[in-house]
Amino acid sequence: MIFLYITILAILLSLLLKRTVWNPLNTDFKWFYLVFVPFALELFVVLRDPGNFAGYITSVAYLTLAVFCVMNWKIPGFPFVTIGTFSNSLAVIINAGKMPVSQRTMALAGLSPNLIDAKHIFMSSKTLLPFLGDIIPINFLNLHYACSVGDLFVYTGLFLMIYLNAPHKKRKSERV
């Protein structure tokens, strides 16, 4: 849901500042098909809960997304997406393939601890690099969410990618 809010905000700002709406099909993405692999793997983990394999599948999803990000580093906004993806990937991979989430953060975000899914694990004294986990509560516009510093980089990059890749509208005098 937060991706939708960010996308709408970037589009509205583009229109307000007289830019055309960004068309991702006109962006020179490299290895674009890779972007669908992590989402399919994550969906599989959430819907099917493959038990002990969830961590491996989630790690492969994050690594695939990291490769896609590196391949598209030069697209405006993508360096932020890449930094966020690598931060999240590191947190997931070193914590047995699951993103650590703070129970306190979940409570502050208005989330029930019963909502934890196969992709997440509660933080404990054994959590490695807990500051990279989901430690930031979001409780805004009916959006209840726990996010990481890496997520904030990804959201910033998504916003910048949409806004910076939306060209300025040509004036009537330039169209002739």
Image (tube, rainbow, N blue to C red):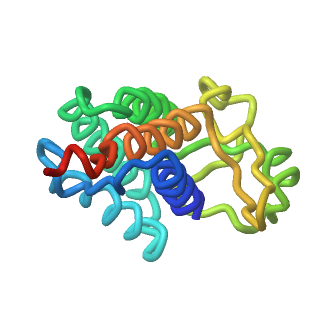
**Whole-percent x and y of residue 71?**
18, 33
**Location of residue 168 with respect to 139 vertically, above or below:** above
**Location of residue 76 with respect to 17 vertically, above or below:** above
Residue at image x 58%, y 37%?
Answer: 152
**Location of residue 161 with respect to 112 vertically, above or below:** above
- In the picture provided, is 139 more to the left or to the right than 2? right
Mark count: 0
Residue at image x 33%, y 62%?
Answer: 41
**Whole-percent x and y of residue 9?**
56, 54
85 or 101: which is nearer to us? 85
31 or 104: which is nearer to us? 31
**Whole-percent x and y of residue 13?**
53, 49
**Location of residue 37 with respect to 102 vertically, above or below:** below
Quadrant position of residue 131: top right
Residue at image x 43%, y 75%?
Answer: 48
88 or 72: which is nearer to us? 72
- In the picture provided, is 107 more to the left or to the right than 101? right
Q: Outermost residue, bottom direction?
A: 47
160 or 31: which is nearer to us? 160
Residue at image x 21%, y 44%?
Answer: 174
Quadrant position of residue 21: bottom left
Query: Which quadrant holds the N terminus?
Result: bottom right
